[in-house]
Image: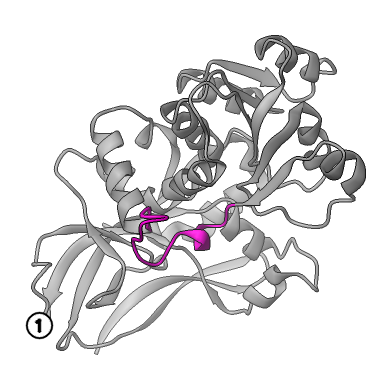
Amino acid sequence: MLKTKVVVCVEPKKVMVQEEDVPEVGPGTFLVGAKLSAISTGTELTLVTADFLPESVWARLAKYPLKLGYSHFGEVVAVGEGVDNFKVGDKVVGWKNHSQLVLYRKGEFCMKVPEGVPDEAAAVFALAIISLNGVRRAKIQLGESAVVFGLGPIGIWAAQFARLSGARPVIGVDLLPERREWATKAGLDEVLDGSDSKLADKISALTKGRMADVVFEVTGHPDAILEEVKVLRRQGRLIILSSPRGKTLFDFHDWCNWTSISIIGAHTSSHPPHENPEDPWTRERNTELFFDLTRNKEIVAAELVTHRFKADDAPSAYQLLMTERKRTGIVLLDWE
């Protein structure tokens, strides 16, 4: 029986690399050896730190020991009978845990990585299409203004995808100077300090007094929403692209009913399972587009990677994220 190394949160704030068996490659299955996997500093860190309310959905998801990860990049190493769309040597990505070896079944989400896409960009595909799906749910029209609160990788991608969708201007907001610098290098129209007492006035000036048509919440902090709605125009759209950890004390009369805004969730599970005339943008289609945009250098991807750890040193990667998250962009685990 083959063995594989996997990254497991055995209890809150304790991450280990463990071994487990890998099922044999049989008919309709194929095996992939990992090259890189990307840590989700939002979802995974929330689960690792147990930073959630006991009655929340998070609490139902966090059943320890818990395998971590969902953005996996590797190479096909064995193919079973009946698998005709993948061959040994293909570089592929999939929605799999941090694992040295992963077994796919025919029909499971798995996509080939085209030539010209850097390995580090391929490894972050799952994080990028979360942003892309959120921008699609915003239904941005040409010339609408967009403000992104929270300029980690997900927020920077949201800003870039919003601009490609026709938003003008695209304004980024963050408390941290490091993240504001990343966003500036990524080409946002304006990047503002979230602690500025005149933030709303500055956004008003940048939007010719109209305020934001769309605001993306990507901070993950429930209280930030109370400030974000203040820069939305009447009947604007607030997109919850992050997974806020906790409750927001929100006056629905003053900030939703009175202003008639729309609040739109954008969890990755809102991707349609199959292409359809109303919404063809499945995970597969968004991944394909992400690869094209990356290969054509229309967006940044690998440039957002700030740290890379050997997979055996995964506990140190999570320790870094728990103690110094402010200075981390994307953190990769290297399995080679």
Which residue bears the numbered disc 1?
Answer: 82
- On screen, residue 286 versus residue 208, left or right, reads left
Along the line of sight, the residue nearer the viewer: 34 or 93: 93
When asked about the image quadrant of residue 6, the answer is: bottom left
- Residue 262, position as x, y percentages in the image: 71, 44
- On screen, residue 73 versus residue 257, left or right, reads left
- Residue 76, position as x, y percentages in the image: 16, 66
The local crowd at label 1, few if under 14, some if 14 to 19, many if 20 or more residues have their Cα within 10 Å, is few
When asked about the image quadrant of residue 300, the answer is: top left
User: Which residue does the image show at 10% across and 61% down from the upper left?
Assistant: 89
Query: Which residue range is magenta in the image?
Result: 266-282
How many discs appear? 1
User: Which residue does the image show at 57% across and 57% down from the upper left?
Assistant: 267
The type of colouring in the image is: one colour
Majority SS type along the magenta span: loop
Q: Can residue 291 be seen in this snapshot?
A: yes
Q: In the rendered structure, does residue 209 fall within the stretch colored magenta?
A: no
Q: Secondary structure at mark 1?
A: loop
Along the line of sight, the residue nearer the viewer: 42 or 210: 210
User: Which residue does the image show at 24% across and 90% down from the upper left?
Assistant: 1
Q: Quadrant of the C terminus?
A: bottom left
Amino acid of disc 1: Gly
- Residue 281, position as x, y percentages in the image: 38, 53
Vertical order, 268 against 305 (above or below): below
Identity of the residue furthest to the front in this view: 277
- Residue 49, position as x, y percentages in the image: 69, 61
